[in-house]
Image (spheres, grey):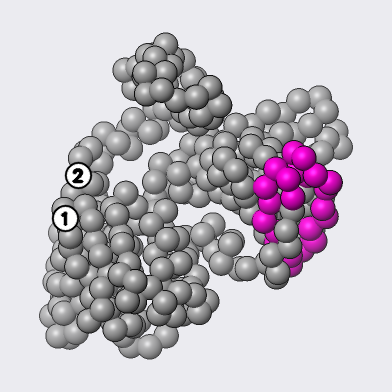
Amino acid sequence: MTPEQRIFNQAAEWFAILQDDNMSKADYQSWQTWLAEDPAHALVWQRVETLSQPFQTLAGTVPANLARETLGQIHNAGRRRALRLLGIGGTAIAASWLLRGLPWQAWRYEYAIAHAAYRTGVGERQQFKLTDGTVLMLNTASAVDVDYGQDFRRIVLHQGEIHVESAHDIQARPLVVDTSVARITALGTRFTVRSDRKSGHVAVFDGAVSVLPEKSAAMRVDAGQQVRFTKCKVIADGVADLAREAWSAGKIVADNIALQDFIHELGRYTAVSIQVSPAVAHLRLVGVYSIANPVSDVPVILAALEHALPVRIQQASPTQLTIISQ
């Protein structure tokens, strides 16, 4: 790690500490000491603070304590009670979607997401241990249901991305992940699945899986391989990219990828709109970035980009940033 990278990492840690409601006076004094230690510390901090403003604007729309309390209540409540906590009923939801003119398939899709037993918001990650010992982690903006029956252990991925470490089942029931267009059957394995309504991606890191599209034959995917799929086909996608698993550890890996692609991935973790000028979209990026706490980490990542590449971050509106040439 270079001295400059170390400063950015330290800035990220301090930014997270200062966002914590439980920050102590000693923490504040230590942060002040860090700022005074080196002019570079203050310079990086000033830029991170500036870039954090759009993220603070969005984060501040709901008090942090209230948001955490509400999320906790929803996770601990039944579906009916969760809807009451939010002050809405199933009929009201259905009516609002119908008034928007959504077709039946789209309505059913959104309804399933809203009622999913396991959900994460934008920028949130959650880990759950299922009844058989399987460890399920949800990435940002994901929605999942779990249905363990007599014949199957079934995980339904409605939206987003999951990381699965399957456990041995004493009843020998297969573990399957169903998406809108395919079924993935685990064969004693560790893998990730990412899905939207029309396509998906599977990367296998241990064991193997079988991917069965809705309208095609199944394909076996072994450890170290990854595939893309639609309802009509499965397409080999080379060696399993460790970046596909890095998010489960709160990291984003940039392995010589275009800036545009990196920002597309980063954008999944924030409601702030980040645009990339065509003039710099092709620039290549290498690095490992923390995304464990997006509100504090994303501004630090953007500040680091200004140091690593000939780019500048321009605030186009209170909740929109544009990356342009220096």
From which residue to which does the magenta span run?
212-233
Among numbered discs 1 and 2, the one appearing first in the sequence: 2
Q: Position of residue 127 (x, y in %)?
A: 54, 46
Residue 165 at least partly seen: no
Q: Residue at x 83, y 28 (%)?
A: 151
Q: Residue at x 14, y 85 (%)?
A: 39
Disc ID at residue 60? 2
Q: Residue at x 26, y 34 (%)?
A: 66
Q: Which residue is mark 1?
A: 317
Residue 145 at least partly seen: yes
Disc 1 marks which amino acid?
Ser
**In which quadrant of the rendered image does the N terminus lie?**
bottom left
Q: Position of residue 94 (x, y in %)?
A: 43, 16
Q: Does dot 2 land on a helix, a strand or a loop?
A: loop
Name the one closer to the observer, 80 or 221.
Answer: 221
Name the one closer to the observer, 155 or 217.
Answer: 217
Task: State the count of labels.
Answer: 2
* 219 within the magenta span: yes
Mark 2 is surrounded, within 10 Å at the Cα level, by few (under 14), some (14 to 19) or many (20 or more) other residues, namely few
Disc 2 marks which amino acid?
Gly
**Is residue 265 depicted above or below 326 in this figure?**
above
Q: Is residue 128 left or right of residue 6?
A: right
Q: Does dot 1 land on a helix, a strand or a loop?
A: strand
**How far separated are the C-alphas under marks 1 and 2?**
16 Å
Q: Residue furthest bottom?
A: 2
Q: Nearer the viewer, mark 1 or mark 2?
A: 1
Q: Position of residue 249 (x, y in %)?
A: 52, 61
